[in-house]
């Protein structure tokens, strides 16, 4: 096969190199397109545009494959813990025992958040959406840790990475505790990374914390499943903000805002609200299926469909089983799980969903687990952000190490041509 793509336009012929990824994905390298032809490409939503070369995550949406650094998501969800996966994503290899212990110890050393941050949190009304609070707090961290902008050395970068992995869970826990009216507290460095997160979120001021292995295992798995997903909306945001050489924390804060939207990470909250609405409406799933298919109705079946998966989202399969296991182990019978399973069954047999290759995505069942763990609905996307943190960091680090240029797309202008200014009194 030729390793060149030919473009013919205006009687001229242009050749562009075709590059091949390690999983045989092909891409036409159009870096020279504008210089040679005077043209740009147009691709709203970037459906066909590769924004970078990346060695972090591979996914094949047609086959339903997801791998972090070459390891399958199924194997990682079963055998690894979240901190190992974070290390793997960020540094490229699974850590050995000594590397993992050092990584964890370095994180513990940074697990304080400046007390003045509490004043910022205090300024938010209790009704504030936790994603807005988390994004603001992450951005505010820059003020307290100005060295986070120094990316000129790997050591400085490592320190920033460890710092955010330490402080972010505290911010997540404080966001939850503020919502619940609980006192803000720190964790316990003698605990594992995820166990500590669980304690920071749920410890009651007047009770000893009781370790809850079912909840911690479930949390660990959910965080791993959300840890990276190549160039999605929030990750692309982190990379593009970072490409202006804004610091890591500022880039992450922007990524959190991107994740908030219901077409992206906000879908987990939207799914649960949808399931609750269906339950309150008598559990008539057929009615909601009809709404989802009606082009005059803005309703969409939340948690269904994906930009790249045109097959089962492999994470959804794992989460569906985990939902069954967690609810079973906790002895919870949630009618919402039955509604979700009913909707899934109907959708998978319905030509509208079959023809458009719409399958349940990662968020179809995740909210049911979060709810069973006692996490309020408005916090679901915050939990997603906590899981996605290592992925964002890994992608940001890769972008900086590869010295990628500032992200700056072109456009096709469709506005007015040059016209003369009309003074106010003549308009
Ligand atoms: N319910 C009903 N119809 C849908 C749904 C849905 N959930 N998703 C897609 N469709 C239909 C569209 O109406 C469109 O139909 P048409 O071809 O007749 O016009 C077709 O399927 C293709 O949909 P697009 O919106 O063009 O697909 P796109 O790749 O742009 O969007 C997205 C993907 C945003 C995820 C979409 O499927 C959606 O809105 N899903 C619901 C929200 C959701 O669950 N988001 C979470 C995604 S996972 C994540 O970000 C973590």
Image (cartoon, rainbow, N blue to C red):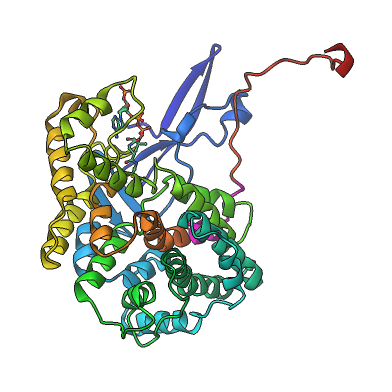
Residue 190 appears left or right of 175: left
152 inside magenta stretch: no
Q: Quadrant of the N terminus?
A: top left
Q: Quadrant of residue 212?
A: bottom left
- The answer to whether residue 63 of the structure is visible from this angle is no
Q: Nearer the viewer, residue 105 or 1?
A: 105
**Does the stretch in magenta take in 400?**
yes
Nearest the viewer among 360 and 134 is 134
Whether 138 is drawn above or below 263: the answer is below
Which residue is at 34% across, 54% downward? 377
In the image, which residues are magenta? 395-406
Q: Nearer the viewer, residue 162 or 341?
A: 341
For the question of whether residue 163 can be seen, the reply is yes
Residue 136, compared with residue 17, is above or below; it is below
**Residue 226, image x and y in percent?**
33, 57
The residue lying at 46 percent from left, 51 percent from top is 235
Residue 92 location (% of width, % of height): 38, 65
Q: Quadrant of residue 307?
A: top left
């Amino acid at each position: 096969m030729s390793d060149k793509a030919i473009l013919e336009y205006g009687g001229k012929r242009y050749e562009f190199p075709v590059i091949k990824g390690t999983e045989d994905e092909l891409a036409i390298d159009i870096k020279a397109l504008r210089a040679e032809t005077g043209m740009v490409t147009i691709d709203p939503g970037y459906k066909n545009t590769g924004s970078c070369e990346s060695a972090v995550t591979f996914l094949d949406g047609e086959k339903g494959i997801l791998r972090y650094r070459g390891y399958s998501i199924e194997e990682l969800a079963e055998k690894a813990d979240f901190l190992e996966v974070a290390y793997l994503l960020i540094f490229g290899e699974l850590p050995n025992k000594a590397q993992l212990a050092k990584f964890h110890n370095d994180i513990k050393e940074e697990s304080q958040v400046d007390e003045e941050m509490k004043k910022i949190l205090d300024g938010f009304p209790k009704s504030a959406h936790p994603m807005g609070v988390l994004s603001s707090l992450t951005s505010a961290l820059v003020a307290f840790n100005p060295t986070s902008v120094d990316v000129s050395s790997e050591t400085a970068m490592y320190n920033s990475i460890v710092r955010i992995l330490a402080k972010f869970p505290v911010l997540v826990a404080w966001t939850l505790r503020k919502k619940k009216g609980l006192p803000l507290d720190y964790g316990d460095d003698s605990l594992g990374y995820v166990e500590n997160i669980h304690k920071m979120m749920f410890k009651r001021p007047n009770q000893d914390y009781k370790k809850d292995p079912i909840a911690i295992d479930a949390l660990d798995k959910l965080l791993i499943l959300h840890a990276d997903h190549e160039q999605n909306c929030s990750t692309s945001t982190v990379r593009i903000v970072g490409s202006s050489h804004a610091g890591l924390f500022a880039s992450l804060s922007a990524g959190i805002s991107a994740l908030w939207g219901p077409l992206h990470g906000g879908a987990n909250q939207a799914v649960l609200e949808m399931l609750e609405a269906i339950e309150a409406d008598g559990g008539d799933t057929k009615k909601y299926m009809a709404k989802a298919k009606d082009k005059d109705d803005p309703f969409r079946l939340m948690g269904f469909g994906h930009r790249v998966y045109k097959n089962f989202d492999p994470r959804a399969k794992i989460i569906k089983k985990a939902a069954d296991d967690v609810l079973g182990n906790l002895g919870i019978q949630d009618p919402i799980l039955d509604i979700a399973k009913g909707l899934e069954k109907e959708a998978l047999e319905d030509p509208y969903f079959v023809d458009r290759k719409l399958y349940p995505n990662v968020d179809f069942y995740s909210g049911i687990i979060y709810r069973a763990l006692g996490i309020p609905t408005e916090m679901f996307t915050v939990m997603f952000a906590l899981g996605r943190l290592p992925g964002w960091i890994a992608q940001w680090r890769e972008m900086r190490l590869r010295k990628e240029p500032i992200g700056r797309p072109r456009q096709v202008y469709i506005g007015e041509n040059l016209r003369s200014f009309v003074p106010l009194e003549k308009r």
